[in-house]
Amino acid sequence: MHISKEREKELKAYIKKIGLKFKNISLLNQSLCHSSYTYENKEERIESYERLEFLGDAVLKLAISDILFNKYKKDSEGQMSSKRACIVSDKTISGFAQKIELQNMVLTGKCEGETKQESIIACSFEALLGAIYLEGGYIKAKEFLIKNFNENILNVDIDNPKAKLQELTQKISHKLPVYKILEESGPSHDKIYKIGAYYNDELVGVGVAKNKKDAEFIAAQEAYTKLTGEGEE
């Protein structure tokens, strides 16, 4: 994997600025490479952040669950689930990422343009968390979140479609909504996702977007509106 001296210098300056230490700079760089960049720069033989994102997503959910469980001792499972759903949403995570100016470090292809999408920034943040986990373990990853975002985590606005839908369905029957991919279209680096929200095995909402999380949010909002009758005349 090739990393230019200029990029390596840039990465080292960045992690110093946000209080991180990395022995494996290649791993750090991978966490900040979108698939559109690796697709357009195959000669660099750099993997995209997708595998690290998968790992980081799990680490993020565990760490947030850990923080909420210990902070809100009187909250029910449903209340904690709603808060966690909002905290791990693209909107909130991209806000975390922008707080540490992560968007300035993410490499994307020319096809993405200069303005990076909210979902890309959020995914990069999860990938970075996955890289931190591989470097120093779960405790280091959790410490990174608490050090930089504890106040944001504990004061997040929980009014979001997925959280509202989950709270609603738990009140009705203690069952959770399920999200399923109905269709994928487009090239691998620029996919469009169509996702359905199911409740009691019934399709109650559909969302279409350029990333799975946004499509789920749209589907959840449609499902919430249908189940509550909001917006109907």
Image: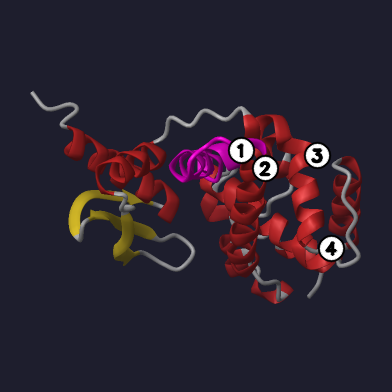
| Closest to the observer, 208 or 233 | 233
Q: Where is residue 42 in the image (x, y as percent from the top left)?
A: 65, 74
Q: Which range is magenta?
A: 71-94
The residues bearing labels 4 and 3 have C-alpha atoms spaced at a distance of 15 Å
Quarter of image, res 6:
bottom right
**First-in-chain label (4 vs 3):** 4
Q: Which amino acid does label 2 sit on?
A: Asn
Residue 136's tag is 4
- Residue 155 visible? The answer is yes
Decide: is 214 above or below 5: above
Inter-mark Cα distance, 2 to 3: 16 Å
According to the picture, the residue beneath numbered tag 2 turns out to be 70
Tag 1–tag 2 contact (CB < 8 Å): yes
Residue appearing at x 47%, y 38% in the figure: 79
The residue closer to the viewer here, 92 or 191, is: 92
Find residue 147 and name its label.
3
